[in-house]
Amino acid sequence: MTDKEERRGDQVVGLLLAAGGGRRLGGRPKALLAHRGRPLVEHAVGVLRAAGCARVHVVLGAAADLVRERARLDGCVIVTNPQWEQGMGTSLRAGLGSLAGTGARAALVCLVDQPGIGPEAVGRVLAARVDASSLVSAAYDGVRGHPVLLGAAHWAGVAATATGDRGARAYLREHAEAVTLVECADVARPFDIDTPDDLTYLE
């Protein structure tokens, strides 16, 4: 990693949304699904770090105490979202709120249930222009997806529009002309682990 990449990784905080209760998975918290022999949340933190995020904030909700007990999240800032059942928007707001006073210029938002998105795709988004005004999104065959990099100047606006399970979607749609898309379809698969059939994606 070059000095420039190290500075970029320090300016950006990895923000992992891992609070979901897995309603369509029979109430199995997504953070604790097994992937490569470890909890999925642990894998996702590793992806962020391998991509260059020196600092990682993890938003927990469903079975938060159990996740803390079972997953190795050393060095992460753990953010507990007591409103996780109201949707991903509450986790995004909680995560962005935890960044106050950190000096970060941007947040790189990832979802815990997308193990098909690895360090190469995350690193591409991180390598884009990073400053307080940045809006950068991975794209898959031209369709916007995750991860998403949100410059600090946008955090308040994103938080104000993050409701239900929409996260930053509404804000990004309203500011589409300002979003830099980074194509990642050649290095990642953006599937979600939502239903029992999706469990076949886990190793």
Image (tube, helix red, strand yellow):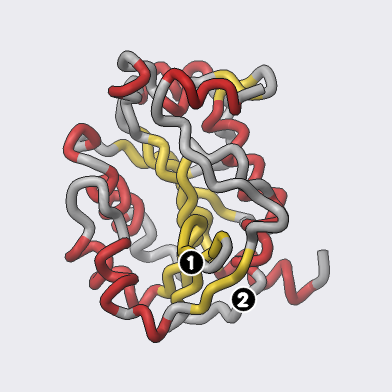
Q: Judge whether residue 104 can be spotted in this image.
A: no
Name of the residue lying farthest toward the front? 141
Q: Quadrant of residue 121?
A: bottom right
Residue at point 37%, 65% (across, down):
101
Side of 98 relative to 156 (left or right): right
Name of the residue lying farthest toward the right? 2
Callout 1: SS: strand
Look at the picture and state if 194 lies above or below 75. Answer: above
Residue type at mark 2 is Ala
Residue at point 25%, 46% (across, down):
165
Q: Residues within 10 Å of mark 1 (few under 14, many from 20)?
A: many
As rendered, which of 47 and 169 lies closer to the eye? 169
Q: What percent of the width, then of the height, locates residue 99?
A: 38, 59
Q: Quadrant of residue 87?
A: top left
Side of 50 relative to 104 (left or right): right
Residue at point 31%, 31% (across, down):
61
As rendered, which of 55 and 28 lies closer to the eye? 28
Look at the picture and state if 201 lies above or below 92. Answer: above
Callout 2: SS: loop
Where's the N terminus, which quadrant?
bottom right
- Going from the N terminus, do you reach mark 2 or mark 1 first? 2
Q: Residues within 10 Å of mark 2 (few under 14, many from 20)?
A: some
Residue at point 64%, 61% (across, down):
184
As rendered, which of 97 and 43 lies closer to the eye? 43
Residue type at mark 1 is Leu
Label 2 sits on residue: 128
Q: What percent of the width, then of the height, locates residue 75?
A: 58, 41
Side of 184 relative to 113 (left or right): right
Task: Check residue 149 in the rendering and tell me which mark sits there, or answer none.
Answer: 1
